[in-house]
Amino acid sequence: MLRICSMVVITSNFLYVAIFIILVLYLNSIIVNYNYGWPTSPPFKRPYLRALNPIKILQINREILYYILSFRHINLYFMWKKLYNTAKPPHLYKDIPYSLNGCRLDIHRSEESVQNNSTLRPIVIYIYGGAWMFGSKQMYCVLAANLANLTGCVVCCPNYLLVNKGNVVHMLQDLKDCTRWLIDHGKEYGGDPENILFVGHSSGAHLSILNLIELISQSYWNTESNNIVRKIKGVIALAGVYDIPQHLLYEIGRGVEDVSGMYRAMLGVTGLKRYSPYYLVQDMLSRSENTSSSQEKDSSLWPHIILLHGENDTTVPVQQSEKFYQVVKELDVTIEYCELKHLDHTNYIIDMMNANYQIHKIISEIITPNVQKIILRER
């Protein structure tokens, strides 16, 4: 009898623990969906039931665990908070309005640039990632400052409208406004407006490449776009998304398509291909084959492009960069692709912020020469 009672108690305790764990998992998922949006991507029926599907609950909590484990980098939070609060001109100029959408940018200058103010430095525009829904220029001030010191460039880090306030159209407008502002005012901060380079990570890489393609497409009939794109020397794209429909399928497989900002940022189904750099380049190739116009076949407007991607990236698979590299090569433009050993989706960014991290030197030795290669190249 005593044995039976013990088994009942153990079973009851086990059930209580199991119920508690299940409740926590569901509560986590509900909080994430509440904060970042209930299902909007296909299929549209019964979004709440779909969000609470047991498989999706497990998938969402797996992603939550991934981000919890990244809290080992919490020291970076205090690092950028301290730098942003203490740095002042002429090393850091903060909150400069630049955009029709009301966004602001920061400008970082190296000690070398400050000391030798008579020499104009190339301008690097850093576009941060965050699934089109996270991020701020403050978060990346350490990275921008390190990038300025490593390369000797003037580094601009702009805020841009995220998916809670805008969409890809607004984001592209912000990138264009930022470039235009730097062309007009870059010299005031020691920058060379004739020598601009974009560096983007993840969704920031997508926007940097998409912005370039849009400018090139418009430059055949828009004088301002033509003028802007000729001042862009290159784009370094880190772990970018270039085929949106393919990546949506990948997000569905991970169970994060509803809480990711991508589908909403791209304006739903109609924008998936419209804002995919891969498909836009395919369209360019098709037009060049079916037209006698030299404009469609002109590769002189394309700057130097370098695609970098970590082999261990499980957030954005390396196939995104491999596929985009192959299609752009057909345009006969200067493009390079490098798959980086032992790196995942965020190593580039996290290790660039802290010299004490194991692969900081490796990342620096990859990024710095590629920046120098582009800014010294004649178009």
Image (tube, helix red, strand yellow):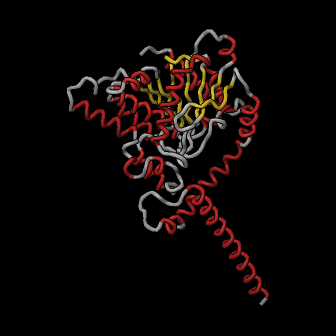
**Where is the N terminus found, in terms of image quarters?**
bottom right
Q: Where is residue 349 shown, x and y percent of the image? A: 61, 35
User: Residue at left 45%, top 30%?
Assistant: 337
Is 119 placed left or right of 305 in the picture? right
Q: Tell me: residue 315, above or below residue 23.
A: above
Q: Residue furthest bottom?
A: 1
**Where is the C terminus found, in terms of image quarters?**
top left
From where the camera sits, is residue 314 visible? Answer: no
Q: Nearer the viewer, residue 96 or 363?
A: 96
Q: Nearer the viewer, residue 121 or 305?
A: 121
Q: Where is residue 187 shown, x and y percent of the image? A: 57, 16
Q: Tell me: residue 228, above or below residue 64.
A: above
Total labels: the figure holds 0
Q: Tell me: residue 50, above or below residue 41.
A: below
User: Residue at left 62%, top 55%?
Assistant: 64
Residue 118 found in image quarter: top right
Q: Where is residue 292 shown, x and y percent of the image? A: 20, 26
Q: Where is residue 342 shown, x and y percent of the image? A: 57, 37
From where the camera sits, is residue 108 visible? Answer: yes
Q: Residue furthest top?
A: 118
User: Residue at left 59%, top 31%?
Assistant: 97
User: Residue at left 60%, top 25%?
Assistant: 155
Is 160 placed left or right of 139 in the picture? left
Residue 21 found in image quarter: bottom right
